[in-house]
């Protein structure tokens, strides 16, 4: 049986989203009208004016003394209102900024009204003294849901604060005996004290409950959602200090100034945590430069890791669109659901030229920074488009390579056919004719002129037969039927320049590789005999598994240029058609080295 910790139980019971919220598309809640500059200027003017009005007793002090803690309280209200306007302007589709602004206004509204002395103003000042608290609690509970209360627990906790600090505040004023209290319909000190204690007890318990719920959600959250919850954690810590302050009041009957200072000052950590998140978002956008710089060399899982690092979301998945299908798969081929079923996941499609290439599946808390999401989506689009173009280029290159190989193979097959036809046809007939001439030479008798003609014809026929054999060897060397080593020895033996052969083989070679190596050696030795003025030459061949290398070197005058004639250029084309490389090194006066590297896979 699996045992759950108390925080696990709370996390399961106090889920941040309802089933209806899970059924609703994630991006569906992010739709709001765009406000013009005049709207935001008016709000900023209103907030600045309200903050100034709250600080009037401090700027121009009169007979009424304003405590330092009250000044801090009003300044904190200004920080909430300012950060709220920034959040609201940045994400007008979210209500978090609106809640933060409302909480900030609630901090100094009582101070503004309290500066007026008529009983109505004094009563209103007491009535709205804790106006900020329900907005503050709603903000702390809903930072992951765009400022929307989406669970019963959230509604219950906010309702507890409304009951304790708004409704019971009215009830308390009904029984409070105080000059200027217009709501004192039933003055009774005992009842007023009992209501006050009930308020404090309920508010203290609600503060602890909010902290427990936020802690449970923090424990169950992913890394990006934990970053988004930082203001909630700060707010929960402040609420715990207020709970300690209320408990101390109930137990001792007096207010601890130390705890009061800690509680009020801790409130500033909420806008500070918000500004920290905003700064981190800006820094994340700054790291986009590194991401764009490395895009060309980033593929597959590496691309996913780079995007996840930029967003700070290790759970990010790049889901590739499967060709000819509505499905998606990750870089390892595992299927991915797009759009995601989980309520805490979002998806953004990646397109190029109107064609969907992939989708980014990420933690929905990152939707609070749509500019960063859009930038990362654009970066992914560039990387995937570049990958697609390179794949297409590689495909075309492979097609060209295959076409060249087919041309070489067809040429070799035609050479083999011509060599066989010459060997089986013309050569055999010429050999038969030579034998007939020899027989005729013995029958012409003593006629010298006839013998001379027959002898001359026999000599010319022998020369023609040798030339035909050389032509057949040039078309396709029959000696290759006995292996490349034998063919190279044959070339060395026929060379007019003394040539040595070193052969290091490792198993059989593909026929195109044998032919290419033979023709490289044949053409190189022919050039040595014609142009090199060499006294010696050497042929060295090595074959190790997936690679064969043939090298022909001489001690001649050098200065060979592989671009000046068609012989070496034709050999280079043949070698490159097999995805090999031909190198010619021929410094003047230092001989020539021709090297061909041929893949054998």
Image (cartoon, grey):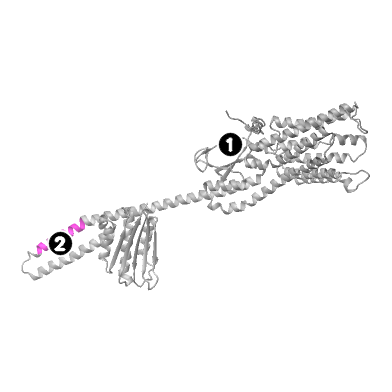
Q: Earlier in the sequence, mark 1 or mark 2?
A: 1
Of residues 454 and 278, the one nearer the viewer is 278
Residue at the front extreme of this rendering? 252
Residue 45 in picture, x, y percent from top left: 81, 46
Q: Which residue is mark 2?
A: 434
Residue 46 placement: quadrant:
top right
Image height of 394 relative to 14, above or below: below
Of residues 147 and 526, the one nearer the viewer is 147
Query: Does the segment drawn in magenta span residue 234?
Result: no
Q: Is residue 553 left or right of residue 137?
A: left
Is disc 2 surrounded by few (<14), some (14 to 19) or many (20+) residues within 10 Å?
A: some
- Evaluate whether residue 407 shows in this view: yes
Q: How many marks?
A: 2
Q: Which residue is mark 1?
A: 340
Residue 487 in picture, x, y percent from top left: 27, 59
Query: Does the segment drawn in magenta span residue 428?
Result: yes
Chief secondary structure of the magenta portion: helix
Is disc 1 surrounded by few (<14), some (14 to 19) or many (20+) residues within 10 Å?
A: some
Q: Residue at x 13, y 68 (%)?
A: 453
Segment tinted magenta in the rendering: 425-440
């Amino acid at each position: 049986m699996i045992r759950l910790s108390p925080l696990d139980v709370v996390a399961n019971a106090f889920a941040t989203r309802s089933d209806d919220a899970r059924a609703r598309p994630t991006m569906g809640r992010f739709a709001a009208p765009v406000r013009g500059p005049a709207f935001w200027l008016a709000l900023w003017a209103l907030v600045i004016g309200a903050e100034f009005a709250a600080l009037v007793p401090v700027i121009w002090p009169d007979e009424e003394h304003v405590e330092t803690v009250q000044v801090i309280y009003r300044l904190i209200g200004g920080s909430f209102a300012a950060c709220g306007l920034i959040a609201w302007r940045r994400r007008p589709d979210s209500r978090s900024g609106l809640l933060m602004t409302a909480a900030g206004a609630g901090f100094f509204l009582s101070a503004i009204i309290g500066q007026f002395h008529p009983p109505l103003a004094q009563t209103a000042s007491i009535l709205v003294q804790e106006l900020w608290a329900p907005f503050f609690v709603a903000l702390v509970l809903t930072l992951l849901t765009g400022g929307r209360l989406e669970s019963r627990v959230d509604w219950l906790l906010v309702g507890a604060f409304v009951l304790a600090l708004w409704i019971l505040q009215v009830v308390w004023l009904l029984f409070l005996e105080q000059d200027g209290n217009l709501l004192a319909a039933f003055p009774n000190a005992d009842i007023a004290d009992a209501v006050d204690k009930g308020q404090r007890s309920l508010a203290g318990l609600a503060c602890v409950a909010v902290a427990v719920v936020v802690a449970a959600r923090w424990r169950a959250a992913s890394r990006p959602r934990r970053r988004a919850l930082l203001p909630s954690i700060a707010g929960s810590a402040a609420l715990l200090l207020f709970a300690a302050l209320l408990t101390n009041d109930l137990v001792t009957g007096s207010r601890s100034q130390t705890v009061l200072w800690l509680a009020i000052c801790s409130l500033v950590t909420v806008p500070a945590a918000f500004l920290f998140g905003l700064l981190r978002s800006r820094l994340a956008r700054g790291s986009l430069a590194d991401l764009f710089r490395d895009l060309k060399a980033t593929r597959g899982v590496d691309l996913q890791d780079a995007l996840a690092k930029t967003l700070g979301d290790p759970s990010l998945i790049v889901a590739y669109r499967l060709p000819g299908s509505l499905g998606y798969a990750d870089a390892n081929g595992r299927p991915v659901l797009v759009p995601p079923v989980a309520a805490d996941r979002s998806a953004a499609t990646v397109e190029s030229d109107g064609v969907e290439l992939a989708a980014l599946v990420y933690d929905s808390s990152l939707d609070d920074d749509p500019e960063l999401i859009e930038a990362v989506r654009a970066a992914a689009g560039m990387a995937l488009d570049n990958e697609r173009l390179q794949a297409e280029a590689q495909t075309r290159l492979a097609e060209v390579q295959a076409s060249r190989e087919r041309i070489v193979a067809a040429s070799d097959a035609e050479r083999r056919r011509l060599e066989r036809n010459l060997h089986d046809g013309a050569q055999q007939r010429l050999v038969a004719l030579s034998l007939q001439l020899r027989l005729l030479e013995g029958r012409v008798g003593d006629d010298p002129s006839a013998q001379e003609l027959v002898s001359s014809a026999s000599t010319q026929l022998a020369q023609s037969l040798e030339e035909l054999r050389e032509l057949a060897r040039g078309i396709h060397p029959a000696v290759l039927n006995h292996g490349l080593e034998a063919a190279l020895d044959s070339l060395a033996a026929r060379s007019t320049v003394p040539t040595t052969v070193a052969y290091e083989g490792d198993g059989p070679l593909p026929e195109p590789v044998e032919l290419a190596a033979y023709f490289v050696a044949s053409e190189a030795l022919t050039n040595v005999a014609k142009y090199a003025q060499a006294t010696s030459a050497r042929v060295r061949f090595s074959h190790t598994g997936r690679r064969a290398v043939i090298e022909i070197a001489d001690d001649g005058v050098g200065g060979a240029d592989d671009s000046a004639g068609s012989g070496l250029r034709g050999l280079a084309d043949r070698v490159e058609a097999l995805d090999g490389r031909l190198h010619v090194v021929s410094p003047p006066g230092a001989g020539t080295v021709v090297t061909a590297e041929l893949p054998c896979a």
